[in-house]
C-alpha cells in the first residue's frame, strides 16, 4: 500500500509539473512585447521614407508610364503598406486619401507633410486588456509651407494651432515673407489591437506640444 501511495504521489507530481510547464510555454505569447506593439507605429513614422525609397527605386519605370498607370503602381505599394499597420475606419480613410494623390503633382509632398527631419524622442507603451494597447510617441519634426496656402483657412489661428512660442499672431500677420518652416514638438497617441499575434493601429490622435516658426527670405 505504501509503495502504491508513493507511486501515485510521484505520478501526480509529474502530471502537475508537466501541466505547469505547458502553461508557462502557452502563456509566453501573451507576455507584453513592446517591440511587437511598436512595430506598426514605427512603420507609420517611416511612411515617407518607404514612399521615397520605392519611387526612387522605380523612377525610370514610373517616368515611362502614363499618369493613370504610374499612380496605380504607387497606390498599390502604399495601400499594401497601410494594410500592414492600419485596420478599420483608419485604414479606409488612408486608402481613400491616397487615391487623390498623383505622382505628377505635389500631392505626395502635401500628404507626407510633417514627416521632414523627424526625430523620435520618447516612446511609451501600455497594454490595455488582453489584446489592446496604447503607444505614446513624443517626437520633433519640421513642416515647410507658405502663408498664402492658409488664405481663407486658418492663417489667423496659426500661432494658436501650432502653439508657436517665438511669434505672436499680430507679428505673423505683418510678416514680410510668406515661406516658413515650423519646428514642432508633438505627442501622438496610437490605439492598437492585436489580431492573430500581430498589432494594428485603429485610431490615433496628434497633439502639438510647442513650436517655433522661421520665416524664409526669398532668393534674390
Image (tube, rainbow, N blue to C red):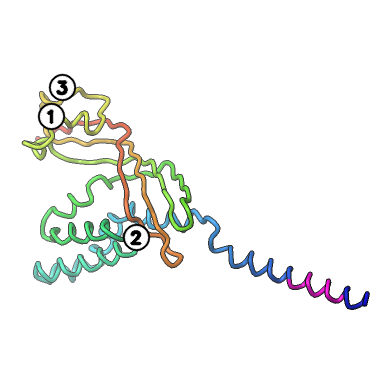
Q: Is residue 210 left or right of residue 35?
A: left
Q: Is residue 89 left or right of residue 140?
A: left
**Residue to which mark 2 is pinned:** 85
Q: Residue at x 6, y 36 (%)?
A: 152
Is residue 21 visible in the rendered image? The answer is: yes
Q: Label 3, secondary structure: give it.
A: helix
Residue 119 within the segment the image draws in magenta: no
- Tell which circle, 2 or 3, labels the residue nearer the N-terminal end: 2
Q: Is residue 84 left or right of residue 24?
A: left
Query: Which quadrant would the C terminus be assigned to in this image?
Result: top left
Report the mark closest to the observer, 3 or 1: 1
Chief secondary structure of the magenta portion: helix
Q: Quadrant of residue 102?
A: bottom left
- Counting the numbered discs, the total is 3
- Residue 117, numbered label: none
Indicate the position of residue 20 as horizontal and vertical percent values.
69, 66
- Tell which circle, 1 or 2, labels the residue nearer the N-terminal end: 2
Distance from label 2 to label 3 (Cα)?
Answer: 41 Å
Looking at the image, the residue that sits furthest to the right is 2
- Residue 156, numbered label: 1
Q: Residue at x 55, y 58 (%)?
A: 31
Indicate the position of residue 7 as horizontal and vertical percent values.
86, 76
Q: Label 1, secondary structure: give it.
A: helix
Report the mark closest to the observer, 2 or 3: 2
Task: Name the foreground residue: 188 vs 112.
Answer: 188
Label 3 crowd (10 A; few <14 / some 14-19 / many >=20): few
- Magenta span of residues: 7-15
Task: Name the foreground residue: 140 vs 86.
Answer: 86
Distance from label 3 to label 1 (Cα)?
Answer: 11 Å
- Tell which circle, 3 or 1, labels the residue nearer the N-terminal end: 1
Residue 65 position (above or below residue 156):
below
**Residue to which mark 3 is pinned:** 171
Amino acid at each position: 500500500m505504501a509503495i502504491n501511495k508513493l507511486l501515485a504521489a510521484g505520478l501526480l507530481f509529474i502530471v502537475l509539473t508537466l501541466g505547469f510547464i505547458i502553461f508557462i510555454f502557452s502563456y509566453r505569447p501573451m507576455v507584453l512585447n513592446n517591440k511587437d506593439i511598436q512595430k506598426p507605429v514605427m512603420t507609420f513614422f517611416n511612411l515617407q521614407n518607404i514612399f521615397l525609397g520605392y519611387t526612387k527605386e522605380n523612377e525610370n519605370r514610373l517616368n515611362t508610364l502614363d499618369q493613370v498607370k504610374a499612380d496605380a503602381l504607387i497606390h498599390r505599394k502604399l495601400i499594401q503598406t497601410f494594410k500592414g499597420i492600419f485596420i478599420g475606419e483608419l485604414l479606409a480613410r488612408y486608402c481613400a486619401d491616397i487615391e487623390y494623390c498623383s505622382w505628377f503633382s505635389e500631392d505626395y509632398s502635401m500628404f507626407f507633410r510633417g514627416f521632414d527631419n523627424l526625430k523620435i524622442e520618447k516612446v511609451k507603451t501600455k497594454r490595455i486588456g488582453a489584446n489592446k494597447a496604447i503607444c505614446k510617441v513624443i517626437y520633433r519634426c519640421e513642416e515647410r509651407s507658405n502663408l498664402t496656402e492658409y488664405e481663407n483657412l486658418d492663417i489667423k489661428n496659426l500661432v494658436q494651432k501650432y502653439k508657436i512660442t517665438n511669434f505672436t499672431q499680430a507679428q505673423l500677420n505683418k510678416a514680410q515673407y510668406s515661406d516658413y518652416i515650423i519646428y514642432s514638438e508633438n505627442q501622438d497617441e496610437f490605439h492598437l489591437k492585436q489580431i492573430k499575434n500581430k498589432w494594428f493601429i485603429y485610431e490615433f490622435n496628434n497633439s502639438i506640444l510647442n513650436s517655433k516658426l522661421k520665416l524664409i527670405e526669398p532668393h534674390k
